[in-house]
Image: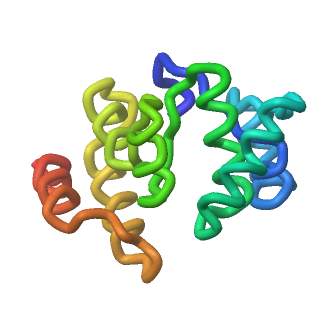
């Protein structure tokens, strides 16, 4: 994904909780940026967390960064997507990322197919089945 013509960033809290270590180090080398929230962004994230208690704290941090800095949010979380839409924040989901990889020819289709198949098989995956099947058909040929 770091070969795509986009920059990717995560809030520092998300990095520490979910990526820190060997994986995180590799992602930073590839181009991932780790961003610290300003005081006003932190206040916004805290307010969002109080209002939307089903969102994780890292999700509220990502929301506050995207909103404050007018960045596009990349998320697979349904509640976060709904909030971003309500607040008119540009966003994309996981399938968008697969589409970008396929359209940019940065990854072989068999690798996209394998990756999406593995992701879709995960018990916590909530991607829409019809959209996934459509892409799997595209990546199979």
Residue 51 left/right relative to 28: left
Above or below for 120 versus 111: below
Residue 38 left/right relative to 82: right
Tell me which residue sits at (45%, 55%) in the image.
76
Estimate the x, y position of residue 78 in percent, counting from the top left.
Answer: 42, 59
Which residue of the protein is positioned furthest toward the top in this rendering? 5
Estimate the x, y position of residue 38 in percent, counting from the top left.
Answer: 86, 28
Tell me which residue sits at (33%, 48%) in the image.
95
Of residue 103 and residue 53, the one placed in the foreground of this image is 53
Residue 39 left/right relative to 96: right
Tell me which residue sits at (65%, 20%) in the image.
69
Of residue 67 and residue 121, the one placed in the foreground of this image is 67
Question: Number of numbered discs present?
Answer: 0
Estimate the x, y position of residue 111 in percent, counting from the top left.
Answer: 35, 51
Which residue of the protein is positioned furthest toward the bottom in this rendering? 123
Estimate the x, y position of residue 131 in percent, counting from the top left.
Answer: 18, 56
Please identify the quarter of the rendering in which residue 68 is found.
top right
Tell me which residue sits at (37%, 37%) in the image.
107
């Amino acid at each position: 994904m770091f070969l795509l013509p986009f920059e990717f960033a995560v809030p520092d809290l998300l990095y520490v909780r979910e990526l820190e270590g060997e994986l995180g180090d590799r992602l930073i080398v590839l181009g991932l940026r780790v961003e610290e929230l300003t005081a006003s962004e932190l206040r916004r994230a805290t307010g969002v967390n109080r209002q939307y208690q089903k969102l994780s704290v890292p999700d509220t941090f990502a929301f506050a960064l995207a909103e404050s800095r007018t960045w596009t949010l990349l998320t697979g979380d349904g509640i976060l997507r709904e909030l971003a839409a309500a607040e008119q924040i540009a966003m994309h989901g996981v399938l968008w990322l697969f589409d970008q990889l396929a359209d940019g020819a940065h990854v072989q289709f068999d690798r996209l197919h394998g990756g999406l198949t593995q992701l879709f098989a995960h018990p916590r995956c909530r991607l829409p089945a019809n959209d996934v099947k459509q892409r799997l058909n595209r990546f199979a040929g």
